Image (tube, helix red, strand yellow):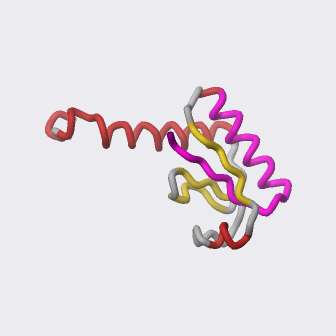
Amino acid sequence: MKTIKILGTGCTNCKVTEAVVREVVAELSIDVSIEKVEDMQQIMEFDVMSTPAIVVDGKVVLSGQVPSKEACKNLLVSILANEAMDTTCCSGDTSCC
Protein backbone atom coordinates (compact mmCIF):
# COMPACT_ATOMS: atom_id res chain seq x y z
CA MET A 1 0.00 0.00 0.00
CA LYS A 2 1.22 3.47 -0.86
CA THR A 3 1.71 6.10 1.80
CA ILE A 4 0.96 9.78 1.39
CA LYS A 5 2.23 12.15 4.05
CA ILE A 6 1.10 15.73 4.40
CA LEU A 7 3.83 17.73 6.08
CA GLY A 8 2.85 20.86 7.96
CA THR A 9 2.73 22.39 11.40
CA GLY A 10 -1.04 22.70 11.55
CA CYS A 11 -1.58 26.05 9.85
CA THR A 12 -4.62 26.71 7.68
CA ASN A 13 -2.74 25.95 4.43
CA CYS A 14 -1.60 22.60 5.79
CA LYS A 15 -5.13 21.70 6.86
CA VAL A 16 -6.52 22.67 3.46
CA THR A 17 -3.84 20.58 1.73
CA GLU A 18 -4.73 17.57 3.85
CA ALA A 19 -8.43 18.01 3.04
CA VAL A 20 -7.71 18.30 -0.70
CA VAL A 21 -5.54 15.17 -0.68
CA ARG A 22 -8.14 13.17 1.26
CA GLU A 23 -10.91 14.31 -1.08
CA VAL A 24 -8.96 13.41 -4.22
CA VAL A 25 -7.93 10.03 -2.82
CA ALA A 26 -11.56 9.26 -1.98
CA GLU A 27 -12.79 10.35 -5.42
CA LEU A 28 -10.17 8.27 -7.20
CA SER A 29 -10.67 5.29 -4.86
CA ILE A 30 -6.93 4.99 -4.35
CA ASP A 31 -5.82 2.45 -1.75
CA VAL A 32 -3.34 4.53 0.25
CA SER A 33 -2.47 5.35 3.80
CA ILE A 34 -2.62 9.08 4.57
CA GLU A 35 -0.59 10.51 7.44
CA LYS A 36 -0.43 14.07 8.73
CA VAL A 37 3.05 14.94 10.00
CA GLU A 38 3.20 18.01 12.24
CA ASP A 39 6.42 17.29 14.14
CA MET A 40 9.08 19.75 12.91
CA GLN A 41 11.88 17.22 13.45
CA GLN A 42 10.14 14.70 11.18
CA ILE A 43 9.37 17.39 8.59
CA MET A 44 13.03 18.41 8.50
CA GLU A 45 14.01 14.81 7.71
CA PHE A 46 12.48 15.40 4.24
CA ASP A 47 14.60 18.55 3.66
CA VAL A 48 11.42 20.58 3.25
CA MET A 49 11.93 24.28 3.84
CA SER A 50 8.39 25.36 3.08
CA THR A 51 5.11 23.75 4.07
CA PRO A 52 2.64 22.40 3.28
CA ALA A 53 4.31 19.53 1.48
CA ILE A 54 3.09 16.25 0.06
CA VAL A 55 5.24 13.13 0.23
CA VAL A 56 4.39 9.95 -1.66
CA ASP A 57 6.26 6.82 -0.57
CA GLY A 58 9.08 8.88 0.92
CA LYS A 59 9.50 11.25 -2.03
CA VAL A 60 8.53 14.94 -1.77
CA VAL A 61 6.25 15.64 -4.74
CA LEU A 62 4.98 19.11 -3.78
CA SER A 63 6.22 21.74 -1.37
CA GLY A 64 5.39 25.28 -0.36
CA GLN A 65 1.94 25.55 -1.87
CA VAL A 66 -1.64 24.47 -1.45
CA PRO A 67 -2.62 22.43 -4.50
CA SER A 68 -5.96 22.93 -6.16
CA LYS A 69 -8.13 19.83 -6.25
CA GLU A 70 -7.44 19.46 -9.99
CA ALA A 71 -3.66 19.89 -9.54
CA CYS A 72 -3.64 17.31 -6.74
CA LYS A 73 -5.65 14.88 -8.84
CA ASN A 74 -3.28 15.32 -11.81
CA LEU A 75 -0.24 14.89 -9.57
CA LEU A 76 -1.46 11.67 -7.96
CA VAL A 77 -2.71 10.17 -11.23
CA SER A 78 0.63 11.00 -12.86
CA ILE A 79 2.63 9.41 -10.04
CA LEU A 80 0.49 6.28 -10.00
CA ALA A 81 0.50 5.94 -13.79
CA ASN A 82 4.29 6.32 -13.99
CA GLU A 83 4.83 3.75 -11.27
CA ALA A 84 2.40 1.33 -12.89
CA MET A 85 4.25 1.61 -16.20
CA ASP A 86 7.61 1.14 -14.48
CA THR A 87 6.53 -2.10 -12.83
CA THR A 88 4.09 -3.69 -15.25
CA CYS A 89 4.79 -2.40 -18.75
CA CYS A 90 5.42 -5.41 -20.93
CA SER A 91 6.86 -7.31 -17.98
CA GLY A 92 10.09 -5.35 -18.19
CA ASP A 93 10.43 -5.50 -21.98
CA THR A 94 10.62 -1.79 -22.78
CA SER A 95 10.79 -2.33 -26.54
CA CYS A 96 6.99 -2.40 -26.71
CA CYS A 97 6.37 0.74 -24.64
Give the quarter of the image for residue 20. top right
Q: Position of residue 76 (x, y in %)?
A: 54, 41
Q: Is residue 11 magenta?
A: yes
Classify 22 as above or below 11.
above
User: In this view of the protein, which residue sits in the foreground, 16 or 40?
Assistant: 40
Q: Position of residue 87 (x, y in %)?
A: 31, 40
The segment highlighted magenta reads 1-26
Give the quarter of the image for residue 49. bottom right
Q: Which residue in the rendered view is the most extreme toward the right?
A: 12
- Residue that appears at 55% across and 39% down: 74
- Residue that appears at 73% across and 46% down: 18
The tally of labels here is: 0
Classify 71 as above or below 45.
above
**Is 77 on the left-hand or right-hand side of 28?**
left
**Is 23 on the left-hand or right-hand side of 92?**
right
Q: Position of residue 59 (x, y in %)?
A: 51, 58
- Residue that appears at 21% across and 33% down: 90
Quarter occupied by the C terminus: top left
Q: Position of residue 31 (x, y in %)?
A: 55, 33
User: In this view of the protein, which residue sits in the foreground, 88 or 62?
Assistant: 88
Q: Is residue 66 magenta?
A: no
